[in-house]
Every structure is written in C-alpha cells, then in structure tokens.
RNA sequence: CGGAGCGUAGCGCAGUCUGGUAGCGCAUCAGUCUGGGGGACUGGGGGUCGUGGGUUCAAAUCCCGCCGCUCCGACCA
C-alpha cells in the first residue's frame, strides 16, 4: 500500500479523552475513532490488526477441533426469559423493540442461542462431543466505558461452547480450549498466564482467566515466575490425546489475580520466584455444567435410551480488547511496537526523497518484490520531511522499516531498521530482501 | 449508580471570574527556500463558542433546562 493513497490520519498530539497508553496510541496512529462512549469505528490500520488477531484466534480454534458458525447480534427476549437471565442481566443488557413492539436485545453473550441450536439439532450421545464457536460483536452497556477498546460497550469477542455427555467429557473440552488459548496468545507475542478464577455457584476448578502481564494492567496479579517464560509454540499439540498433563503443568504453580490471591501460598514461594505484577484479562474459560442445558432442556439420548442433560462450558476471548492489551504490553515512547504476527503491515518503506529518480525506482522495485513474495508493505511515498516520516513509522509500529535515501540509492544500499530494538544497519538491496522475505 | 469536571477551528488549549466585533500552537491550502528524526518564511481558508430558553442596548462570558464526553469510586470480556 502506498501511503499517499492510504487513509492514515495520525495525530501529533494526545487527544484529551485518552488516559491510558494503548488508547492514546490507537487514536494517534489512526487505528480507531470514537463513535460514542465505548463504541468505536475501526479505521483501515486498526481494522487490519483486528483481522489478523481474529484470524489467529480462528486458526487455533479450528486446530483444536472447534467448529465456526455465526450467530446474530440481535436476539429475542423470550429466549432469555427461558433461561431466566432476562431479568438477571439488568441494565447491562441493551434492550430494544422492533416495529411490532417485540422485545429484542443486542446480545451480550450467546449461551442461550447456541443452546437452542444444539437442542433442536442434536439428539444422540453419539453426536457428542461438540465444540462450536463464533466471532461476533457483542454489546454490554457498561456503566462506565473507558480505556478505549479495552473496556468498550461494543466489542468483538470469540466465544466457544462445548457440549458433552458428562463432566469428564466437559473436562476434555475444557483442556482443549486451555491449550488452544495458550497457543493463541503466544502466537500474538503475548505472555498470557492462566490464573484460577471464580467459579461462582458451580464450584470446582474448571475456570481460568488468561492474564497478559502489562505494567498498566487493570488488576494486580501474583504468580510463580516459572510460568512467565515458558515455551508454548515449539511443539505441535495433538488434541486427540489426553491434555490433562499439560494443563496440570500450568495450574500447579501458583498464579492468582488479587481477587483470588492467597498470600500464604505466594509467600511460601522462594523469593526469587515471586512475581507481583499487573495484568489484563484477555480470555476466560469456564465449565458451567447444566446451568443452561437444564432450563433450556438441551438433552440427548444416552446409551440406554434415556435422556441426558448435556454438560456445557463456554470459552471467551476478547478479540478487540486484545489490540489494547498487546499495545499495553508492547510500546515505547515513540509509539506502538507490533509483534510480527499481528502487525498491520510487515514492513514500512520510507522513501526519503520521492522526487529523486534513484530513490523512487529503488523503492518501487523493493516494494514490488516484497509484495510479490507475499509480504504486506506500507510504502511511504509522500513528500513529507524525513523526521515526520520516521516519527509516523515509529508511531504505527511496523516491525521492519526500510529507509531509502538518495545517497544509498545511488549505490543500491538501504537502511534496515528493526522497530523493536531500534537496531539499524546499512545493507545492499538483495541482503535486505533476504532478511525481509522468509525463506527468500 | 454515587462523587467531580469539561464542551470555543481537524487536534491541543487561552478567553468566562470582571458581558462590548473570537484568539494561540499544531494540522490544512498556495508559494519560496529547505531536505536523514515531527523545518523556516510569506500569504490564505476554516467557528451557528454543545444545545434550547432567559436576563441585557449588547452573551463564549451571567441564570435555568437539556444533550454529549471525561475522571474517581462501585461493577466488568
């Protein structure tokens, strides 16, 4: 993409409404604009990141055997009366009426809807287990939206639902999602640590929050340092084998948010192993048994022919919130530092002097070859000053920058800069291409 | 939902106390010079001062209502 043809309204100054760094940077980098309190439009740069994050989530769900579908944003109030949640949900639920004065609502979550889909189509234990998910916009009318997309009212969420014949089956589904979540967040360059969460009236140990460590995180967290730098991605996961040992290896060391903090257990750790930090919740997995299948009568015929109420779990990832979380965890004074896997573009080319023939031709050659190799490139071909171009490129945080000036262009040399480290080196064009094209 | 603020150009703000022809910086447009870390100069464009009412010869400024946004707390993916 040529910057001269793109839509990238960057701001030099901080908008006064933005308090935390991710919100400021998303506004300054031209990723989002607020439409009203807690509701945002996604501008092209932000939308690209949103799509990449969504795709990673999708790939890992699919790998774990979860099936994607899509349920609507608008649901019927009657459905929620059936589960008893229409009244319980209170003012957080956005209630609306259609032209026939039927009561509708903008879905804050989808347990009811997915359960009715399941109950009307699945009749036998032989069709179990089933894991279904969708990635859809939700609305929760938060009393006090803040922190930009980290706590908006409208948000994009991936939610999965598991259906099993018994609790042991539900635990297997839970473990699959547990492992899939570890991989999902690791692929985005995040250190996300599963921490035991409140299970409410259900009880048991089957609820975890996945917490990203970030200095500006909203809640205090305490954990064993051993959990922080674990390698998650180097081994492929076979979702057909028993995953309990992997889950156990993660849940054995101490990890808790301040709400569930057990100071005695934490203090028992060797001092060098204690990590007290701040964190952002980006995922939550939850077994809730028959809480919805009971009132909504989601039953299948068991092996003996008698109806069995299915055991369910739900598994959420805050997709739009992840943008904020990633920026909170990865930025510096100059701007965002995107992890490679989620960056809106892989590479930024800065032409320092677009009206210089050598610069322009080297840049467009480079641009064409990178694109031909499948790389996403933002090519700054504008007539701005060098300083402004550097500042914009640092602000939007593309992992690699290629700076082409008239001096280098004459000799076929470009400057390669890694955003994360700031490391720069002058290299020949072919060497740059070698670095920027995997297996190239 | 309790408490506290703020709405003046695209963004950041001054002007409001003490009423008298709406300003500054950045951005933007034109031109000249510049040219490797948010350039300089010259000239321009852009405002129903959130909104409705009231007081007054005169309201961004004083009074009342409404709307929007933000912050602190409680709550939360």
Image (cartoon, rainbow, N blue to C red):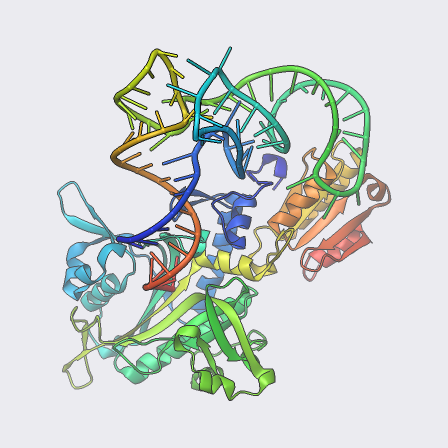
Which quarter of the figure has residue A225?
bottom right
In this rendering, does residue A376 appear at all?
no
In the rendered image, residue A259, in percent from the top left (x then y), is placed at 39, 74
Pick whichever, B6 or A56, lies toward us.
Answer: B6
Total marks shown come to 0
Which quarter of the figure has residue A229?
bottom right
Q: Residue at x 46, y 75 (%)?
A: A194
In the rendered image, residue A151, in percent from the top left (x then y), is placed at 41, 56
Q: Residue at x 67, y 50 (%)?
A: A370
| Vertical order, B34 against A47 (above or below) | above
Pick whichever, A8 or A177, lies toward us.
Answer: A8
In the rendered image, residue A114, in percent from the top left (x then y), is placed at 26, 64
Pick whichever, A207 or A426, lies toward us.
Answer: A207
Q: Is residue B5 left or right of residue A191?
A: left
In this rendering, does residue A366 appear at all?
yes
Q: Residue at x 18, y 43 (%)?
A: A98
**Quadrant where the C terminus of chain A lies?**
bottom right
Q: Residue at x 34, y 75 (%)?
A: A198
**Quadrant where the N terminus of chain A lies?**
top right
In the rendered image, residue A166, in percent from the top left (x then y), is placed at 26, 82
Q: Is residue A118 left or right of residue A376?
A: left
């Amino acid at each position: 993409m040529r910057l001269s043809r793109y839509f990238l309204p960057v701001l030099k100054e901080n908008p006064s409404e933005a308090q935390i760094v991710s919100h400021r940077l998303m506004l300054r980098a031209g990723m989002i604009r607020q439409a009203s309190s807690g509701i945002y439009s996604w501008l092209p740069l932000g939308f690209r990141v949103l799509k990449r994050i969504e795709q990673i989530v999708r790939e890992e769900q699919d790998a774990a055997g979860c099936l994607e579908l899509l349920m609507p944003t608008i649901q019927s109030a009657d459905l929620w009366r059936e589960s008893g949640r229409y009244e319980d949900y209170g003012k957080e639920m956005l209630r609306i009426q259609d032209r026939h004065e039927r009561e509708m609502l903008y879905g804050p979550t989808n347990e009811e809807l997915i359960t009715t889909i399941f109950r009307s189509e699945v009749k036998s234990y032989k069709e179990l287990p089933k894991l279904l998910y969708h990635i859809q916009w939700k609305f929760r009318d938060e009393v006090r939206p803040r922190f930009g997309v980290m706590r908006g009212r409208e948000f994009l969420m991936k939610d999965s639902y598991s259906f099993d014949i018994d609790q042991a089956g539900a635990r297997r589904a839970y473990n699959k999602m547990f492992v899939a979540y570890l991989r999902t967040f690791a692929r985005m360059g995040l250190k996300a640590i599963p921490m035991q969460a409140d299970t409410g009236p259900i009880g048991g140990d089957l609820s975890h929050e996945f917490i990203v460590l970030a200095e500006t995180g909203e809640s205090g967290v305490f954990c064993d340092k051993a959990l922080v730098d674990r390698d998650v991605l180097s081994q492929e996961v076979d979702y057909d084998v028993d995953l309990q040992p992997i889950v156990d290896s993660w849940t054995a060391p101490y990890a808790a948010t301040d709400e569930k903090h057990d100071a005695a257990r934490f203090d028992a750790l060797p001092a060098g192993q204690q990590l007290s930090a701040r964190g952002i919740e980006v995922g939550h997995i939850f077994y809730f048994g028959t809480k919805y299948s009971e009132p909504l009568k989601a039953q299948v015929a068991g092996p003996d022919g008698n109806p069995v109420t299915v055991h369910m779990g739900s598994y959420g990832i805050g997709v739009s919130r992840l943008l904020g979380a990633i920026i909170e965890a990865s930025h510096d004074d100059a701007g965002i530092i995107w992890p490679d896997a989620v960056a809106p573009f892989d590479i930024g080319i800065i032409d320092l002097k677009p009206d210089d023939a050598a610069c322009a031709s080297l840049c467009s050659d480079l641009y064409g070859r990178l694109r031909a190799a499948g790389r996403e490139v933002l090519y700054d071909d504008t007539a701005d000053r060098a300083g402004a171009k550097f500042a914009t490129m640092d602000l939007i945080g593309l992992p690699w920058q290629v700076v082409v000036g008239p001096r280098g262009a004459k000799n076929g040399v470009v400057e390669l800069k890694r955003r994360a480290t700031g490391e720069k080196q002058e290299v020949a064009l072919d060497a740059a291409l070698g670095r920027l094209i995997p297996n190239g």
